[in-house]
């Protein structure tokens, strides 16, 4: 059985070489390569101390071997959804990077599968790009937990979810630029806490707006164990019992919809992982490491192996759940 990591990021700078001169201010550029670390510059903003494995296939394969991972489901480095750009320009960048991921999965078949990205600031363009990448051979798309401040439960995204359902595309929701992040920059709390908050908000907004009732075959999984949702689902159930406007939208307790969503295992703490596997249907939990970022869980395979569940259930989490989703 192949052990498959469903939460693994990549950025391929070479994808933009032919348009770099025209769009030099908006395209990410890699600088300061030293000691297996690098910096990424977009306009005047620099992100420092990124791992080589984000860009280098050889470094990535070595790291996968150290983590006991056989295959990765690759997705774009989430700081680069390009939602802040004009949709036409963003779509150009996205298409070029999606093509680069596809070529990588073909060159290293058996090691990588690929998720593309779509310009969700323009629903029509996002649907067309999703159709294109699924036809080409990518298995789905990574999307943000919010799009320029609008949560995924907003009805304007319904046509996109409908298209994803019809295409049998797998969606991966990853936070980026959390709502209110400008107020919590100290100690990088926008990343360490804000990301999980934004994922929780995304799922709750989808639940309360009836996304999981409307699109019953939608295949969608959420980063970082679903944020705080598994731990706070009782609070949402209570909201349903109190708020009449929620009851007008959905006819089940929010906890009913835990069976409709999937989450990864990026929760770091073993006791949290134990709780996650108890709270969620085991068929809805996918191995994730957040590779190759600094916050990756290098020991996630061993943690899953130590869970007090059956070997069959461990195999589901380690890879069989992903394979079933993509069959």
Image (cartoon, grey):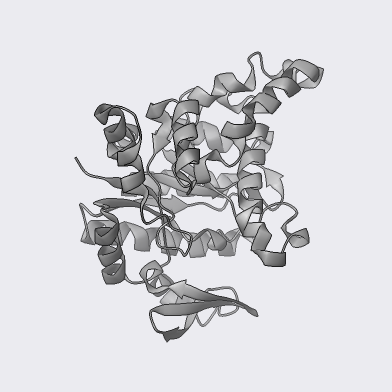
Q: Residue at x 61, y 39 (%)?
A: 228
Between 313 and 93, the residue placed more toward the observer is 313
The quadrant holding residue 11 is bottom left
Q: Residue at x 33, y 28 (%)?
A: 309
Total marks shown come to: 0
Q: Residue at x 45, y 59 (%)?
A: 95
Quadrant of image for the C terminus = top left
Please determine whether, in this image, residue 179 is positioned above or below residue 51: above
The quadrant holding residue 106 is bottom left
Which percent across, then down, holds residue 26?
59, 73
Q: Residue at x 67, y 58 (%)?
A: 190
Report the side of 153 relative to 162 (left or right).
right
Please determine whether, in this image, residue 251 is positioned above or below residue 99: above
Which percent across, then down, holds residue 183?
78, 60
Report the side of 94 relative to 244 (left or right).
left
Between 96 and 173, the residue placed more toward the observer is 173
Between 323 and 290, the residue placed more toward the observer is 290
Quadrant of image for the N terminus = top left
Confirm whether residue 143 shows in the render: yes
Which percent across, then down, holds residue 15?
40, 70
Please determine whether, in this image, residue 111 is positioned above or below residue 170: below
Between 14 and 86, the residue placed more toward the observer is 14
Please determine whether, in this image, residue 73 is positioned above or below residue 61: above
Find the residue positioned furthest to the top.
Answer: 251
Confirm whether residue 157 shows in the render: no
């Amino acid at each position: 059985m192949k052990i498959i990591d469903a939460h693994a990021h990549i950025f391929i700078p070479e994808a933009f070489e032919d348009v770099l001169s025209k769009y030099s201010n908006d395209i990410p550029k890699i600088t300061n390569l030293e000691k297996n670390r690098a910096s990424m510059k977009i306009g005047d903003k620099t992100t420092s101390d990124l791992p080589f494995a984000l860009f280098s296939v050889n470094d990535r394969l070595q790291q996968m071997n150290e983590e006991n991972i056989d295959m990765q489901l690759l997705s774009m480095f989430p700081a680069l959804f390009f939602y802040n750009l004009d949709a036409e320009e963003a779509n150009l960048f996205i298409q070029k990077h999606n093509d680069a991921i596809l070529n990588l999965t073909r060159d290293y078949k058996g090691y990588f599968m690929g998720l593309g990205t779509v310009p969700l600031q323009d629903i029509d363009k996002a649907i067309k790009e999703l159709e294109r990448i699924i036809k080409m051979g990518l298995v789905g798309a990574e999307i943000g937990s919010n799009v320029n401040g609008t949560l995924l439960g907003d009805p304007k995204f319904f046509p996109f979810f409908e298209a994803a359902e019809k295409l049998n595309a797998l969606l991966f929701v990853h936070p980026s630029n959390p709502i209110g992040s400008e107020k919590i920059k100290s100690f990088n709390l926008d990343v360490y806490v804000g990301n999980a908050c934004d994922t929780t908000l995304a799922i709750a907004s989808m639940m309360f707006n009836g996304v999981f009732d409307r699109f019953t075959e939608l295949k969608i999984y959420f980063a970082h164990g679903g944020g705080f949702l598994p731990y706070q689902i009782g609070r949402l159930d209570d909201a349903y019992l109190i708020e009449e406007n929620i009851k007008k939208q959905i006819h089940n307790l929010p906890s009913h919809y835990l069976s409709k969503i999937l989450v990864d295992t990026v929760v770091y703490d073993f006791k949290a992982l134990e709780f996650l596997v108890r709270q969620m249907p085991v068929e809805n939990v996918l191995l994730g490491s957040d590779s190759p970022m600094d916050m990756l869980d290098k020991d996630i395979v061993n943690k899953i192996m130590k869970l007090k569940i059956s070997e069959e259930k461990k195999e589901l989490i380690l890879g069989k759940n992903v394979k079933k989703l993509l069959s």
